[in-house]
Amino acid sequence: MSLQELRSKVTKKSRKLLGRGNASGRGTFCGRGVKGQKARTGGKIRRGFEGGQTPLLRKMPKFRGFNSPNKVEFRAINVGKLEKLGKSEITLSNKKRPYKLLGDGEVTKALTVKVDCASKGAIEKIEKAGGKVEILMKQ
């Protein structure tokens, strides 16, 4: 056996070349399929194009209104929870999500509370029990 008769067991498949002559001669253009937008030069289709049909994004409803950049979201905390803490002086403050003291629950002890914001009912309940509320946040 000579070197010319040796054959490799691994065969390489050549890749398909596009744009080199008529592929089959029956209406195909350079291996790009039959006519149509994709067969033309510069025939690009933008993202989201559905062939002239109304695109899904345009069928979707538009949501009304806007989001205020100055909106402040408070963390609510009730007067009854402060009673359970068992402290006489309590400070509740946070710049990103400030605390608001609400008047749900009962207060029996005199509390000194420093809080970002408070409702009228909460202030009345604490002052009625002999305590004091100091509001830290300016509105």
Image (spheres, rainbow, N blue to C red):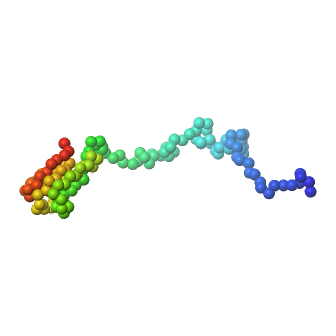
Residue appearing at x 33%, y 47% in the figure:
63
| Percent coordinates x, y for residue 135 in the rendering | 16, 47
Horizontal placement of 132 versus 85: left or right?
Answer: left
Q: Is residue 63 above or below residue 81?
A: above
Give the residue drawn at x 19%, y 46%. Answer: 136
Residue 80 visible: no
Q: Nearer the viewer, residue 8 or 107?
A: 107
Q: Quadrant of the N terminus?
A: bottom right
Residue found at the far top of this picture: 42
> Outermost residue, right direction?
1
**Front residue of this view, candidates 29 and 118:** 118
Does residue 31 appear to the left or right of 66 in the view shown? right
- Residue 21 sits in quarter: top right
Q: Name the residue at 61% across, 38% down.
A: 40
**Residue nearest the observer in this picture, 26 or 85:** 85
Q: Position of residue 125 (x, y in %)?
A: 10, 56
Provide residue 98's location: percent of width, then percent of height.
Answer: 24, 49
The residue at 10%/55% (across/down) is 131
- Residue 86 screen position, x and y as percent: 18, 62
Q: Nearer the viewer, residue 88 or 30?
A: 88
Q: Is residue 19 in view from this perspective?
A: yes
Please determine whether, in this image, residue 102 is positioned above or below residue 44.
Answer: below
